[in-house]
Image: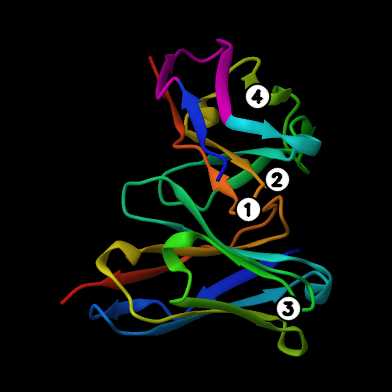
Amino acid sequence: EVQLVESGGGLVQPGGSLRLSCAASGFTFSSYWMTWVRQAPGKGLEWVANIKQDGSEKYYVDSVKGRFTISRDNAKNSLYLQMNSLRAEDSAVYYCATRWILDDWGQGTLVSVSS
Amino acid sequence: EIVLTQSPGTLSLSPGERATLSCRASQSISKSYLGWYQQKPGQAPRLLIYDTSSRATGIPDRFSGSGSGTDFTLTISRLEPEDFAVYYCHQYDGSPRTFGPGTKVEIK
């Protein structure tokens, strides 16, 4: 059974940083593209970033380019999202999901950016 | 960027009725790289349909997807009580990937 468990969310001041993690199990993590998707409170889904199996390709939505970095550690079956220069509009539940088709999702971790 | 528009914004139907949800793309989506997701309050989204018309594992056959180019449809043949939720389309053809704004299917 595929399991994705996000962690690392919390309350941070504008301009601050957070590192989100996604622990994966139940599938061959190193064989899958992985994706981060976020959802602001009461709003729709927003695709944030994805990363190729070996980490050689990474793509981002324009609003986070230069501030967020997606990475992975296949030895630890883990996906990460380093978030710097956080803004109020980055406040959301952040989900990790598998592959391009997003066939499995974690339960999400809440990031709140506020002073 | 491929912009996805979903209609209607809200669909009010009764259990047993047929639901037809539309997703329109601002430019053609090649290789049918479009999916549909269901989300209930407080839960993560769940994949229903991928590659326009393929049902994900465990998804009942009352859910079907169709379309091509810029126009795509999710059909729920007979609504069950558990189907009342928000539905999102998502394209994974262009970069960045994008989602539609969602269609809420509510009980009439």
Quarter of the image containing the N terminus of chain A? Answer: bottom right
Nearer to us of marks 4 and 2 is 2
Question: What's under tag 4, amino acid-wise?
Answer: Phe
Residue occupied by mark 2:
B93
Residue at the limit of the structure toward the left, as seen here: A115
> Residue A5's quadrant in the figure?
bottom right
Classify mark 3: helix, strand or loop. loop
C-alpha distance separating marks 1 and 4: 19 Å
Which mark is drawn over residue B72? 4
Same chain, labels 2 and 1 = yes
Q: The disc labelled 2 sits on which kind of residue?
A: Asp
Q: Secondary structure at mark 1?
A: loop
Q: Nearer the viewer, residue A1 or A56?
A: A56
> For the point 52% across and 38% down, which residue is it?
B3
Tell me, what colour scheme is on the image? rainbow
Q: Residues within 10 Å of mark 2 (few under 14, many from 20)?
A: some
Which residue is disc 3 drawn over? A55
Q: Are marks 4 and 2 in contact (CB under 8 Å)?
A: no
Q: Which residue is label 1 attached to? A: B95
The kind of residue on which mark 1 rests is Ser
How far separated are the C-alphas under marks 2 and 3? 19 Å
Q: Chain of mark 2?
A: B
| Residue A29 vs residue A57, the one in the foreground | A57
Q: Residue furthest top?
A: B17
Q: Are marks 2 and 1 in contact (CB under 8 Å)?
A: no
Say if the magenta span includes residue A14: no
Nearer mark to the viewer, of 3 and 1:
1
- Cα separation, mark 3 vs mark 4, equals 32 Å
Q: In the rendered structure, are the residues bearing label 3 and label 1 in contact, judged by CB atoms less than 8 Å apart?
A: no
Q: Which residues are magenta?
A: B8-25
